[in-house]
Image (spheres, rainbow, N blue to C red):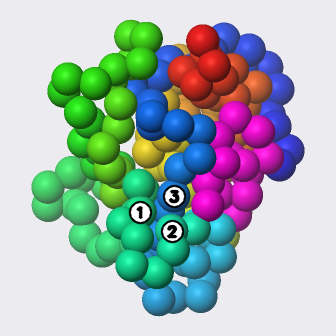
Amino acid sequence: MGLSGGASVATPATYRWAGRTVTYRITDKSAYYRQIWRAAVRHWNAAKVVKLVPAQTGQTANITMSVKNDTTKQYGNVIGLTFTSYHANQSLGSLHVLANARSYVYKNVARAMRYSQLERERVAEHELGHALGLGHAASKRSVMYYASRGIAISSGDVKGLRQAYFE
């Protein structure tokens, strides 16, 4: 996984899933972007906090991952976005329980900003972090920093996820 060090302050969580096994589905047909999303899944699974598993055929996935074009009109030059919904009347500790999440990498923006494959993987990791319940980190050495480029999942990101799911 290659945790980046330094960011030892826990990344804050705003939501979490009811359990630690979370299903996902990659809906994009592109082998290139499927590989990027799979790398992000592997990296979060390597943290050993949650277990991301592919949804079975016919099963609704907790998290849907894909790519899109053209966020610039609505969101500016955003390279990725995650949309979540949660159960308003269900919480674990102080965190609302997630109902579903949809994460996207915007390929036209990635191309225009000349992101490498590794940098696109980091964007996917960032968006998947949101889909798992993490917010933005204060540390620039965190994949969850709002404007990170090429930064890996940090010890602070793992610490925040661990606090959300174990405390």
Residue 55 is marked as 2
Where in the figure is residue 87, as x and y percent of width and height?
23, 33
Instruction: Say which residue appears at 26% left-offset and 36% top-offset.
Output: 86
Tag 2 near tag 3, CB within 8 Å? yes
- Counting residues from the N terminus, which is met first, the one under dot 2 or under dot 1? 2
Whether residue 154 can be seen here: yes
Q: In this view of the protein, which residue sits in the foreground, 120 or 43?
A: 43
Q: From which residue to which does the magenta span run?
A: 39-53
C-alpha separation, residue under disc 1 versus residue under disc 3: 5 Å
Tag 1 near tag 3, CB within 8 Å? yes
Q: Residues within 10 Å of mark 2 (few under 14, many from 20)?
A: some
| SS category of the residue bearing label 3 | strand
Q: Residue 80 in magenta?
A: no
**Which quadrant holds the C terminus?**
top right
Amino acid type for the residue under numbered disc 1: Ala
Q: In this view of the protein, which residue sits in the foreground, 144 or 12?
A: 12
Instruction: Say which residue appears at 30% left-offset and 44% top-offset.
Output: 99
Count of numbered circles in the view: 3
Q: In this view of the protein, which residue sits in the foreground, 118 or 38?
A: 38
Q: Residues within 10 Å of mark 1 (few under 14, many from 20)?
A: many
Q: Residues within 10 Å of mark 3 (few under 14, many from 20)?
A: some
| SS category of the residue bearing label 2 | loop
C-alpha separation, residue under disc 2 versus residue under disc 1: 5 Å
Tell whether 8 sits left or right of 90: right
| SS category of the residue bearing label 1 | loop
Please name the residue that numbered disc 3 is placed on: 23
Where in the figure is residue 12, as x and y percent of width and height?
50, 18
Residue 61 is marked as 1
